[in-house]
Image: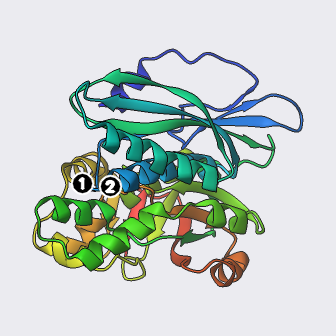
Amino acid sequence: MLDKVLAAIPRVTNENVLVGFDTADDAGVYKLTAELALVQTVDFFTPIVDDPYTFGAIAAANALSDVYAMGGKPLSALSILAYPAKGDLDDLGQILKGGADKIHESGCVILGGHSIADEEVKFGYAVTGAVHPERFKANSGARVGDALVFTKRLGTGVITTALKREIASDAHVQAAIESMLMLNRGACEAMLEFEVHGCTDVTGFGLIGHAREMAIASGVTVEIDTAAVQFLPGAVDYARQGALPGGLKNNREFASCVVEMARKIPAEIESLLYDPQTSGGLLISMTEKDAGPLEKRLPGAYRIGRVLVKGAKAIRLI
């Protein structure tokens, strides 16, 4: 739906806009000087876990992730809050503290924010970062022959849905929370030590949705080895039980038309490839020779595919 609306918005040409909304990238990049560009992004959402402090921290990690995906360093943040006028003030304080602690962990500072009264809680941040104008990592940089490296396991959407349905084990929920709380700072710093051509973080559109954006923006086909993709504990079982979030179904409806399947894939595995992630990992397109060293340098990073010459479909699943 948003794609159709954005297509009607006039593009304003500005030589300082290095990345706008044309390629559905993670953040915008605006050149200030020959040595400095701003990276700007915004993200907020409704609670996905029960604990207010944890929710605030996850919201912060998720918002910061877009800056890291561009190869940038977060500098400042503005909070965005919707909260019931008669809501519990202790819970609100914990949300804000969780967010602030995670923002400060990144080395970023909170300058202020904006709040409104709303019966549905929503929280997040607008984050500004810095990057060299010739060294940012866009989703449009993937090159034929590149290896695809991913830095986290999939399944946060399915597991948090299982939590809402009260069928998720505490251990599985905790593993998902730990993944969502992990900043992509280490992944960003590690990838910048190698020859990286393109990058995106895998969040609300799922692995296939974000791989689609990378493939279309780069003019290539992205091949994903489904047997190589790693999942959070419990995610496959919950997907098999039908704990599929609404966003997963929307992602499938939107992106399945650009997917070619070279073999039959179990339904639960295919579903998880569309699973909307919160504070997901970085999907990195990089030289084949550097993929192995990055895997050794960054614990948890692993190859999931490669970049091919553009074919009939943007995504090929094997």
Task: Describe the colour scheme in one phrase.
Answer: rainbow
Answer with mark 2 or mark 1, whichever residue precedes in sequence: 1
Determine the residue positioned at 52% across, 27% down: 113
Front residue of 27 and 80? 80
- Which quadrant of the figure contains the N terminus? top left
The residue at 87%/30% (across/down) is 33
Q: Is residue 297 depicted above or below 129 in this figure?
A: below
Relative horizontal placement of residue 24, taking residue 95 as reference (left or right): right
Three-letter amino acid code at disc 1?
Answer: Leu
Question: Based on the displayed image, in which of its 4 quarters is residue 279 positioned?
Answer: bottom left
**Other residues around mark 1 within 10 Å, as few (<14) / some (14–19) / many (≥20):** many
Please state if 306 lies on the left or on the right of 211 as rendered. right
- Residue closer to the observer: 90 or 283: 90
Residue 267 shows in this picture:
no
Displayed quadrant of residue 190: bottom right
Indicate the position of residue 260 as horizontal and vertical percent values. Answer: 33, 63
Q: Which residue is mark 2?
A: 276
On the image, numbered disc 1 is attached to which residue? 248
Between 235 and 87, which is closer to the camera in this rendering?
87
- Residue 278, percent from left and from top: 39, 55
Q: Secondary structure at mark 1?
A: helix
Asked if the residue at tag 1 contacts the one at tag 2, i.e. Cβ–Cβ closer than 8 Å, the answer is yes
- Determine crowd level at label 2: few under 14, some 14-19, many 20+ residues with C-alpha closer than 10 A: many
Q: Residue furthest front?
A: 90
Image position of 307 with respect to 48: above or below: below
**In the rendered view, would you say 41 is above or below 206?**
above
Q: Residue at 24% x, 54% y: name it.
A: 248
Q: Residue at x 40, y 78 (%)?
A: 230
Image location of residue 105, percent across then percent down: 62, 56
Where residue 193 sits, quadrant-wise, is: bottom right
